[in-house]
Amino acid sequence: MIDQQVSLRGGAARLPVRPRTGRYLVLAAVFVCAACGLVYELELVALASYLIGDSVTQASVVLSVMVFAMGIGSLLAKRLCSRAAVGFGLIEAALALIGGSSALVLYAAFAWIGESRYALVGFSLAIGVLIGAEIPLLMTLIQRVDRQDAGGAVADLFAADYVGALVGGLAFPFLLLPMLGQLTGALLTGAVNAAAGGALVLWVFRRDLTGRSRWLLIAANVTVIAVLATAAVLADDFERAARRAVYGDRVRVVMQTGVQEVVLTGAGRSSLDLYLDGRLRVSSRDESRYHEALVHPVMNGPHVRVLILGGGDGLAAREVLRYPGVRSVTLVELDPAVTRLARTDQALSALNAHVYRDPRLTAVTGDAFTWLRAAHGHYDAVISDLPDPGISASTKLYSAEFYGLVAEALAPGGRLVVHGGPPVGRAHTFWTVEASMRAAGLRTRPYRVSGRYAGFTAGPDRTKSRATVVHGWGFVLAALGRAPALGLDPGAPELKSLTEPALREAGRRAESGRLPGQAPSTLVHPRYWDEP
């Protein structure tokens, strides 16, 4: 036993540092690599949610595939334990290259191919295998540096791994994403990953390397860092080219806010498009049809005080303020950048008729759910102009609990209108919205209006699909007590496309496609994200 311990210590003596120092250096590398690995995971989840939609599904796919792949990587790493130093160095170089370039490749697949799901699964598998291979090799290396019992070595490794994951998890949303963006942030993370792995092996374990292995690792790490650095330098040009592929050549405004990416294209009433996180929210060619159908049926009744949830572009408010009987409009928008753009952009402010100059309009920044819970009085009309319920972050704004809060905010005789998505293209979602409203004690009247553009959807819209004919927009008008009648206020302003007969036909069209037996969506059991 004594001879065995001396032999092990003798192996450690070949290292250029003292055993305790070497152990700390290995743990420091574990810390850095763990932080980088979690950044890769979070970057894949965030970018997939943006490019594909439905963050719950994308997070489940990425994490489950990655954890499965980590198990495979751990098994495969057993073959490398006899050459743990060079194996770890090559794995970190590969992980840095694949993880660092993953965001760029995913975005390129989305922009030029139109499909990034297969790339997402491929990157999740590859990154998971490489991360899974780290621990067996690091276990071998730490025992090589400073022999200790297996339980203590595992405890040290996992402590450094978990603390590194914490740092990486916090750095991604609070540092990398807001300061560098997804592409540059991932590339920088890859460079740090390569530098940490390469430095550990080429310095601490350099005497374990043959001359050929040493030059192989140097070449691999220099190549990886050079590739990532070159990609970082060209990232802005790449983003512009990819953005043109997605949005066309008339991109005027691009902002990455704390909430979402905001893109404005075109400049006039016939060409202006507003995208939020890649989803078409406003098309000037068809927005009047949408906003007339959303706003004017709910104004057929008392409308002295009006509440708009969402609608920071000001277009729903434009229709509301055409009624002289309106005394106050409160608009609750989550992203202040959208309201600021609607105030200051010449084309968008012209489209919304400069509503933010109207003293009757008060814009409030906040989450609609949280804002309603604070109880701000009662309103004659409430207009819900929110992101599609198929977007996971918005499911709470289409829940029975949310509609219960809205019901409490309605004045006697007050009415609510909700955009619930296309009743034909996403019938399950639309009728789940209607069922959730009924579960909150509201009496409903659904209606469907035809439209040309595939906007307001759960999945990102590509330029080439904008002219696709869709089955229109679905709305639900609701009130307490009895179901409201579909009609227009006798004093309604002149409208471009909406008439009383057309509105009644819209109601019949919606009812003809009713899906009976839909369960309401609640906070603890959301029912939108699982629709194909």
Image (tube, rainbow, N blue to C red):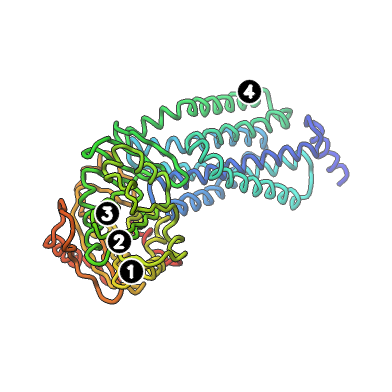
| First along the sequence among labels 3 and 1 | 3
Amino acid identity at mark 4: Trp
Q: What is the quadrant of residue 203 in the picture?
A: top right
Amino acid identity at mark 3: Leu
Amino acid identity at mark 1: Met
Q: CA distance from mark 1 to mark 2?
A: 9 Å
| First along the sequence among labels 4 and 1 | 4
- Label 4 Cα neighbours within 10 Å, binned few <14 / some 14-19 / many ≥20: few
Name above or below for residue 390 compared with residue 196: below
| Horizontal relation, residue 139 to residue 76: left or right | right
Foreground residue, 503 or 414? 414
Residue at which label 3 appears: 321
- Label 3 Cα neighbours within 10 Å, binned few <14 / some 14-19 / many ≥20: some
Q: Residue 143 at what x, y percent from top left?
A: 75, 42
Residue lying furthest bottom: 481
Which numbered disc covers residue 437?
1
Q: CA distance from mark 3 to mark 2?
A: 19 Å
| Horizontal relation, residue 180 to residue 202: left or right | left
Residue at which label 2 appears: 418
Q: Are marks 3 and 1 in contact (CB under 8 Å)?
A: no
